[in-house]
Amino acid sequence: MASAVALCGTAQAQSKGKTLVAYFSWGGNTREVAKYIQQQTGGDLFEITTVTPYSADYNECVNLAKKEQQDNARPPLAAEVKDMAAYDVVFVGYPNWWGSMPMVLFTFLEKYDLRGKTVIPFCTHGSGRWGRSLDDLKKLCPDVTLLEGFAVSGNSARRSKDDVVKWLQKIGITSSK
Ligand SMILES: Cc1cc2nc3c(=O)[nH]c(=O)nc-3n(C[C@H](O)[C@H](O)[C@H](O)COP(=O)(O)O)c2cc1C
């Protein structure tokens, strides 16, 4: 009986198809979570980057991010996903910036047609968890199957592997052994 359950779980994970783990990270926290997800799912890792990189200076980055949000900017992407149509499951990861996603996530989500795909958000944050980002994401991703996401404090991101494993099992992306 136990093996039947395990087989069912495996089949479910396999039937979900090809996986992309797309993320933006300024300081590295979100990248760590993205890597854990990639390790668990075997998906392709894609870093969302801007043509003009953000300053490494925290205050400069914070100020520019605020201005971009106020201006409803769409910072151009520095790299493209080769064949988005090939993916059935798309993880979308980002840090909470000023209560939502960095504006380059808006650029990214407007560029690609994710309709019909399974979209799974993850975010790292200072303490504001998702902020308004899930509402924004839903507006930008119509007609997708949105699964429960994963939010973790940036300070805990590097220690979040076990929680990532449990979350992926809970939402049926991977099977428990
Ligand atoms: C420009 C900027 C704006 C931020 N705004 C928020 C915010 O509104 N709420 C929050 O909880 N954390 C905020 N943070 C903290 C980040 O969400 C947090 O440190 C995150 O883990 C950074 O991820 P990263 O290392 O992948 O860039 C902000 C950080 C930056 C650099």
Image (cartoon, rainbow, N blue to C red):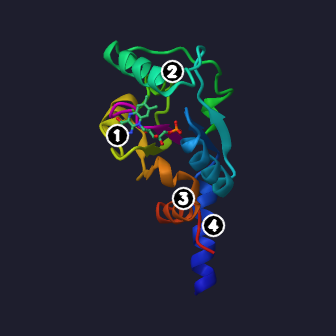
**Nearer the N terminus, badge 2 or badge 3?**
2
Find the distance from the CA under tag 4 to the CA under tag 2: 32 Å
Name the residue type under label 4.
Thr
Along the viewing direction, whichever of 8 and 98 lies nearer the viewer: 98
Q: Nearer the viewer, residue 28 or 135?
A: 28
Q: Earlier in the sequence, mark 3 or mark 1?
A: 1
Query: Of marks 2 and 1, which one's residue comes earlier in the chain?
Result: 2
Q: Looking at the image, do the residues carrying marks 4 and 1 touch, with CB atoms under 8 Å apart?
A: no
Mark positioned earlier in the residue sequence (4 or 2): 4
- In the image, 166 versus 14, the foreground residue is 166
Q: Which residue is mark 2?
A: 111
Picture residue at 58% right of the left edge, 69% below the top: 9
Looking at the image, the residue that sits furthest to the bottom is 1
Q: Nearer the viewer, mark 4 or mark 1?
A: 1
**Label 3 element class:** loop
Residue at 38% x, 29% y is: 140
Quadrant hosting residue 83: top right
The amino acid pointed to by label 2 is Lys
Residue 102 coordinates in the image, percent (x, y): 44, 28
Q: Residues within 10 Å of mark 4 (few under 14, many from 20)?
A: some
Q: Please rate how many residues cluster around mark 1, counting C-alpha atoms within 10 Å: few if below 14, some from 14 to 19, many from 20.
A: some
For label 3, the residue is 160
- SS class, disc 2: helix
Residue 146 shows in the view: yes
Numbered tag placed on residue 134 in the rendering: 1
Residue 94 sits inside the magenta stretch: yes
Q: Indicate left or right for 85 with 109 as reference.
A: right
Counting residues from the N terminus, which is met first, the one under dot 4 or under dot 3?
A: 4
Residue behind mark 4: 10
Q: Quadrant of ligand 1?
A: top left
Spatial CA span between label 3 and label 1: 21 Å
Given contact means CB atoms under 8 Å apart, are the residues at marks 2 and 3 in contact?
Answer: no
